[in-house]
């Protein structure tokens, strides 16, 4: 899975982003780290989602997709995504995508940033406000190609239920509506979701809202109603879903008011929440009997899987953060874990172990210090002197980088083509301008009356000849002096270049296996994927500098050399692999090519889509992963534009033009063409690509098309003009059709056994 804020590739059990410190919400709800999903009647495996390459825009856009979805569903574009989620229901139309493992691993030079205070409800309201204000939720695009579908959180947690009865939630008329599979019609859960449904205060699309949650057994719904779109707070309610029927539309039990965010214990018997009042963020918990104040100035909080512990961060007025835990009982007292928190890296679901990084104000690159606090024991320093954490595991394993800094002199990057000549150049002597008086003499003259007087006579012929000679000498002097002054300036520039030092940093990649630190590689540029569960890490290295020396005769200041040095591209396309801390090995080397790297769920197969720079398609290769690296290269397919890993199988698009192409799968090593004229990126993958839901005849304008189901080796059209859908099983699909972009609503249909359809509702905005 990936961070929805910065796009960093995350380990399956990671609770916090290693790049920016953002909390990573687990499946079910933000507290259920490892809650198992129960299969609906069709018993299909967890839905998977294909992803395209991610660029900086998609990393930002990924904030739209709920982290719960990434945790609950194995994402096929993630090279090392795990297939542990067991729900089979998905959404077809996401608001954004998570980045791919091939392109989103952070550059090792990027140090992690302190964890931000959790986004209050306004961010979560954006998607709903836009839909209710008549705006369409758009898919994010990557590198000019529409990205693939991200599975929605509610499709996982609410369309499947422990008793195999599907539950559907959707938004209409500023209300959330609910329908179980056995109900004849849907009923409104909320009365007025937003106090101002036409509000334009929130720009963008936050994707899956977090103001509605169900517990693990899916028999309790917690939700905010009457949300103040300016304050970002609402009233919190709980409703027993077993009490909801066609005839019972009561709102449920009131929990609290002025709530900005909330989180559940897995069993739904306790809820923790923040209340914002008078610019003070107070943390409470409620056991559905009474409300208990926990602490003030709380910036983030977490409920343990068993619902027995709270962990939270208090931020003081100076921005310093302190980490606490507290038992969830009325007489519980808080325990300070540590102060000067940088960010929580990861933790066990029961908070028995918490891994965190502390703030270090030093200017040293390698200022990171990683600690673990185990319940009942003192904190222990695990690793120090690192720059950034690449990936982490709640089992206490980490990939991280250290910066190797060295100093370079700018003069070393200069070709001193004038040195020899400048050494011979001396300051010229300026010629003396001839004076006219030097060519004058006094001549005696006899006056009119015979008196004698003297007259000044100038020898202009001699003077003019001398001046002409002077002018020629001065011209020569000017040339020599200009040359000398240039030499003086270059001498000064030489001194500045020799004195100027730049810090050159390179990264080394390390593995902490829970006991000791191990160097994996030096001169690492970036990691393409890092999977702690299989111990596979793939990375590029920094190439040796090939900067051509700059002639000193062509530059005027040190900044020109510094810019040239900093602007040089030292990236190297070569791919290296290390398995379980073993010796690195080079396995891919194609200059002028781009590699999109993914890993099978079990870590036994590595895939590389290699495409020539500037081209959208290339050849898909597979490698067997052994203790010695990536070996036994084979060609899977040619002219591949996008691909996804589904367990041990593949899905890929070929012969793509204008985002339409052939849909193919590789099942048990055998390629199969599923259909032609398929819209790229809108395919839902189930049962390790043995079951697919895809669009054909798709309109980019209306974002609607014909919905098709591939199952048991055959494809069948389900419906036309489908805007969005929820797949429960091949026997039950909900979809919205005839969607009006102007009004932002369409008709909601129920389709059973791919033939019997029934209109459920009209003027539906979107699914939750």
Image (spheres, grey):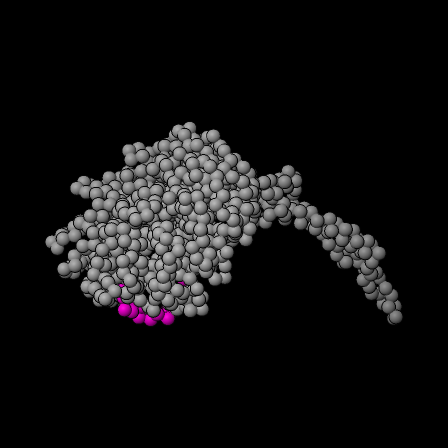
In the depicted structure, whether residue 554 falls above or below residue 521? below
* Residue nearer the viewer, 687 or 476: 687
Q: Would you say 633 lies left or right of 648 here?
A: right
Q: Residue at x 23, y 66 (%)?
A: 247
Q: Would you say 525 lies left or right of 360 here?
A: right
The magenta-colored residue range is 189-204
* Residue nearer the viewer, 493 or 743: 743
Determine the image quadrant of residue 503: top left
Q: Main secondary structure of the magenta part?
A: loop
Please say whether residue 577 is visible from this viewpoint: yes
User: Is residue 126 shown in magenta?
Assistant: no
Task: Estimate the x, y position of residue 525 in percent, counting from the top left.
Answer: 45, 40
Q: Residue at x 24, y 51 (%)?
A: 163
Please say whether residue 205 is visible from this viewpoint: no
Q: Residue at x 67, y 49 (%)?
A: 481
Q: Residue at x 24, y 63 (%)?
A: 245
Quarter of the figure that contains the C terminus? bottom left
Task: Estimate the x, y position of residue 714 in percent, counting from the top left.
Answer: 44, 46
* Residue nearer the viewer, 560 or 750: 750
In the depicted structure, whether residue 126 falls above or below residue 302? below
Q: Residue furthest front?
A: 756
User: Is residue 199 shown in magenta?
Assistant: yes
Task: Estimate the x, y position of residue 489 in percent, counting from the top left.
Answer: 59, 48
């Amino acid at each position: 899975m990936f961070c929805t804020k910065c796009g960093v590739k995350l380990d399956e059990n990671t609770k916090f982003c290693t790049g920016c410190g953002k909390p990573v919400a687990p499946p079910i709800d933000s507290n259920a780290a490892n809650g198992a999903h129960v299969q609906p009647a069709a018993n299909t495996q967890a839905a998977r989602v294909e992803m395209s390459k991610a660029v900086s825009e998609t990393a930002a856009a990924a904030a739209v997709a709920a982290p719960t979805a990434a945790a609950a569903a194995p994402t096929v574009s993630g090279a090392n995504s795990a297939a542990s989620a067991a729900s089979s229901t998905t959404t077809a139309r996401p608001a954004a995508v998570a980045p791919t493992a091939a392109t989103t691993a952070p550059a090792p030079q990027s140090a992690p940033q302190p964890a931000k205070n959790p986004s209050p409800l306004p961010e979560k309201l954006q998607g709903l406000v836009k839909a209710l204000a008549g705006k369409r939720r758009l898919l994010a695009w990557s590198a000019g190609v529409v990205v693939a579908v991200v599975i929605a959180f509610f499709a996982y947690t609410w369309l499947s239920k422990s008793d195999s009865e599907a539950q559907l939630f959707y938004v209409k008329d500023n209300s959330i509506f609910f329908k179980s599979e056995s109900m004849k019609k849907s009923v409104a859960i909320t009365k007025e979701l937003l106090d101002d449904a036409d509000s334009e205060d929130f720009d963008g699309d936050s994707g899956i809202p977090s103001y509605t949650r169900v517990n693990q057994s899916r028999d309790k719904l917690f939700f905010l109603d009457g949300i103040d779109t300016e304050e970002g707070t609402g009233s919190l309610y709980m409703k027993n879903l077993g009490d909801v029927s066609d005839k019972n539309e009561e709102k449920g039990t009131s929990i609290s008011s002025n709530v900005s965010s909330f989180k559940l214990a897995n069993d739904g018997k306790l809820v923790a929440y923040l209340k914002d009042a008078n610019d003070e963020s107070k943390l409470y918990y409620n056991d559905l009997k009474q409300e208990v104040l926990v602490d003030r100035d709380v910036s983030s909080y977490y409920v343990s899987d068993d619902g027995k512990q709270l962990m939270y961060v208090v931020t003081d007025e100076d921005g310093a953060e302190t980490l606490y835990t507290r038992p969830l009982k009325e007489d519980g007292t808080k325990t300070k874990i540590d102060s000067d928190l940088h960010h929580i890296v990861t933790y066990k679901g029961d908070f028995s172990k918490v891994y965190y990084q502390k703030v270090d104000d030093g200017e040293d690159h390698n200022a990171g210090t990683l600690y673990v606090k185990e319940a009942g024991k003192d904190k222990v320093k695990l690793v120090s002197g690192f720059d950034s954490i690449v990936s982490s595991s709640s089992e206490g394993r980490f990939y991280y980088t250290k910066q190797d800094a060295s100093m370079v002199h700018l003069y070393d990057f200069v070709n001193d083509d004038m040195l020899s000549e400048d050494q011979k150049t001396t300051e010229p002597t300026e010629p003396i301008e001839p004076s006219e008086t030097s060519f004058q003499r006094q001549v005696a003259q006899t006056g009119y009356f015979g008196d004698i007087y003297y007259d000044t006579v100038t020898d202009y012929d001699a003077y003019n000849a001398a001046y002409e000679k002077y002018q020629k000498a001065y011209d020569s002097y000017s040339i020599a002096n200009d040359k000398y002054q240039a030499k003086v300036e270059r001498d000064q520039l030489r001194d500045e270049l020799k004195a100027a030092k730049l810090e050159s940093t390179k990264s080394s990649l390390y593995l902490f296996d829970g006991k000791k630190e191990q160097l994996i590689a030096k001169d690492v540029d970036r990691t393409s994927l890092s999977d702690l569960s299989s111990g596979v890490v793939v990375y590029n290295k920094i190439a040796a500098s090939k900067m051509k020396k700059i002639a000193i005769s062509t530059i005027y200041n040190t900044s020109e050399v510094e810019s040239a040095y900093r602007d040089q591209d030292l990236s190297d396309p070569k791919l290296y692999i290390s398995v379980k801390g073993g010796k690195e090995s080079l396995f891919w080397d194609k200059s002028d090519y781009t590699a999109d790297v993914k890993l099978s769920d079990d870590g036994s197969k590595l895939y590389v889509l290699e495409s020539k720079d500037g081209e959208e398609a290339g050849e898909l290769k597979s490698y067997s992963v052994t203790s010695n690296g990536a070996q036994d290269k084979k060609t899977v397919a040619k002219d591949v534009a996008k691909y996804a890993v589904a367990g041990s199988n593949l899905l890929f698009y070929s012969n793509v033009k204008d985002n339409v192409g052939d849909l193919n799968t590789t099942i048990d090593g055998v390629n199969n063409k599923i259909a032609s004229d398929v819209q790229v990126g809108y395919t839902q993958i189930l049962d390790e690509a043995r079951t697919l839901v895809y669009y054909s005849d798709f309109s980019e304008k209306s974002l609607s098309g014909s919905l098709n189901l591939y199952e048991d080796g055959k494809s069948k059209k389900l419906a036309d003009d489908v805007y969005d859908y929820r797949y429960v099983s091949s026997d039950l699909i909900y979809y919205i059709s005839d969607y009006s972009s102007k009004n932002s609503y369409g008709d909601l249909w129920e389709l059973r056994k791919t033939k019997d359809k029934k209109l459920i509702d009209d003027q539906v905005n979107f699914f939750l």
